[in-house]
Amino acid sequence: MNRGQLRTEVEAIIGRTDKASVVNKGLSFGLQEVGKRWRWRGLQAEVSLTLLANGLSLTLPTTCHQVVEARVTDGTSSGSWPLELKTKGWVMWRYPSITALTAGMPVYGYVENNVLYVCPKADKAYSVLVTHSTLPVDFAGDTSLNPITTTDLALVAWAAGYTFDSLEMFDSASVWKQNFEVALVNAIRTDRSINPRFQADGEGSTSRTSSTTPWLDPFEKGMVSR
């Protein structure tokens, strides 16, 4: 739906047509909130970044909201390898002095301040293919379509709650805020069902790389001094 159609739906809920500017603002805020809540498949992009020899970090595009996945390749027929994305705390607890590690193919990575840090430092030049989500662009006008097509109901609910708040009808606002959460969960389920990339890191994970570089993992069997 476009913004004009979405606003018509909200106006039917609030029973007023004299709050167009408030509803439009609610739709804009709602769109940004929806964009932050999930890595929508329609808002993903892939970029190839060059990691130089002895490199430890890569600057991500300014449009990057969240890194979905990253893969490392040296440009040979060997293909590419997944870069395991962890939290900064996870990496630093295990490798407090990354610069002191022997250079090799990067195995782990974490993101901070729009920079992708890798571990260990690169032993040669690599290409890092980064898939990342972006935030939706705001509506330019009434004919602008919702860029996340499965979230029309969520946007209507958010804007209705926002407008009821502005009218100090707080009970009605609360109801539509709850409706927003339900509609958003359903939209995320739909997006997830057709995008199998998102998986929990558990027993079924095949991304464990310590088997090929056991010296990087202090918990690898046989690597811990007794």
Image: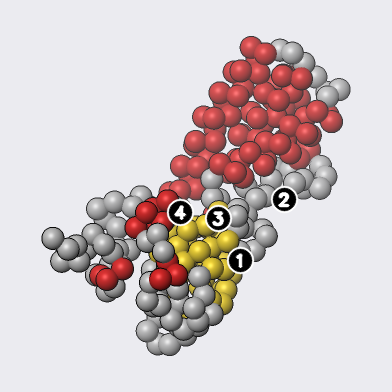
Sequence-wise, which precedes: disc 2 or disc 3? 3
Residue placed under numbered mark 4 in the picture: 88
Image spot of residue 27 (x, y percent): 72, 35
Sequence-wise, which precedes: disc 2 or disc 1? 1
Give the class, few, some or many, for how many residues have Cα within 10 Å of label 4's Cα (few <14, many ≥20).
few
Q: In percent of the image, x 80 and y 19: which residue is there? A: 16
Q: In percent of the image, x 71 and y 36: which residue is there? A: 29
Q: In percent of the image, x 65 and y 50: which residue is there? A: 135
* Apparent side of residue 88 relative to residue 66 in the rendered image (left or right): left
Q: Nearer the viewer, mark 2 or mark 1?
A: 1
Sequence-wise, which precedes: disc 4 or disc 1? 1
Q: CA distance from mark 2 to mark 4?
A: 29 Å
Determine which of the numbered discs, if any, sits on residue 112 in the image.
3
Say which element carries label 2: loop
Q: Is residue 141 above or below residue 105?
A: above
Say which element carries label 4: helix
Specify the quadrant of the image occupied by residue 119: bottom left
Q: CA distance from mark 4 to mark 1?
A: 16 Å
Instruction: Check if mark 3's residue and mark 4's residue have beta carbons within 8 Å.
Output: yes
Amino acid beneath label 4: Lys
Frontmost residue, 86 versus 153: 86
Say which element carries label 3: strand
Instruction: Check if mark 2's residue and mark 4's residue have beta carbons within 8 Å.
Output: no
Quarter in which the C terminus is drawn: bottom left
* Apparent side of residue 38 relative to residue 192 in the rendered image (left or right): right
Image spot of residue 30 (x, y percent): 67, 36
Give the class, few, some or many, for how many residues have Cα within 10 Å of label 3's Cα (few <14, many ≥20).
few
Say which element carries label 1: strand
Amino acid beneath label 2: Val
Amino acid beneath label 1: Thr
Q: Residue furthest left?
A: 226
